[in-house]
Amino acid sequence: MEHNNVAHTVFVVLYLVQIVNAVIYFKLSIVGFISIFVGLFLIILASKERRKGEFTTCGVYAIVRHPEFLGHMLIIFGLMMISRTILSVLVFSILIAMLYLGILYEEKENLKKFGKNYEDYMKRVPRLNIVEGIRRKYKFKE
């Protein structure tokens, strides 16, 4: 459990470094702002749909399995695009790797907790690919 606390603290500190870096080295970036906006939107939607400890497959969770992680990834990407420094690229890379490892850990725990239901969900809903998730949910042809 202590390992998770250390990893979480490192994640939060690096996230703050990314934010401060974006404020200090601010450059107008439409892509950055759109990415941040979409990321925040996903996090807000997902947090409203998720119930503490419950397995949900509705709303945005019917499109991607990890909308909150994806939201943070988009925000971190947007912050990198706004500051465009070597530090922001380095921090972006570390944070994305940490988030991806967090996703893998969460999936392993969800498989233990929810079993076959989660396994079936994994087959139906992509991990992070929102375009593929929309295509599958609304049955668009390739």
Image (tube, rainbow, N blue to C red):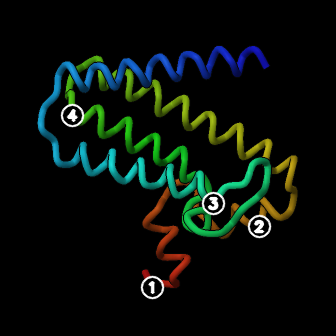
Tell me, for residue 49, which label it has, or none.
3
3 or 2: mark nearer the eye: 3
Q: Earlier in the sequence, mark 1 or mark 4?
A: 4
Residue at 87 percent of width and 49 percent of height: 113
Question: In this picture, is 96 found above or below 71?
Answer: above
Residue at 54 percent of width and 16 percent of height: 10
Which quadrant is the C terminus positioned in?
bottom left
4 or 3: mark nearer the eye: 3
Residue topped by disc 1: 141
1 or 3: mark nearer the eye: 3
Q: Residue 62 falls in which quadrant of the image?
A: bottom right
Three-letter code, disc 4: Ile
Q: Earlier in the sequence, mark 4 or mark 3?
A: 3
Q: Earlier in the sequence, mark 1 or mark 2?
A: 2
Q: Are marks 1 and 2 in contact (CB under 8 Å)?
A: no
Q: Element under label 3?
A: helix
Three-letter code, disc 1: Lys
Residue at 72 percent of width and 46 percent of height: 107
Horizontal and vertical percent position of residue 116:
86, 62
Residue topped by disc 4: 82
Question: In this picture, is 9 found above or below 142?
Answer: above
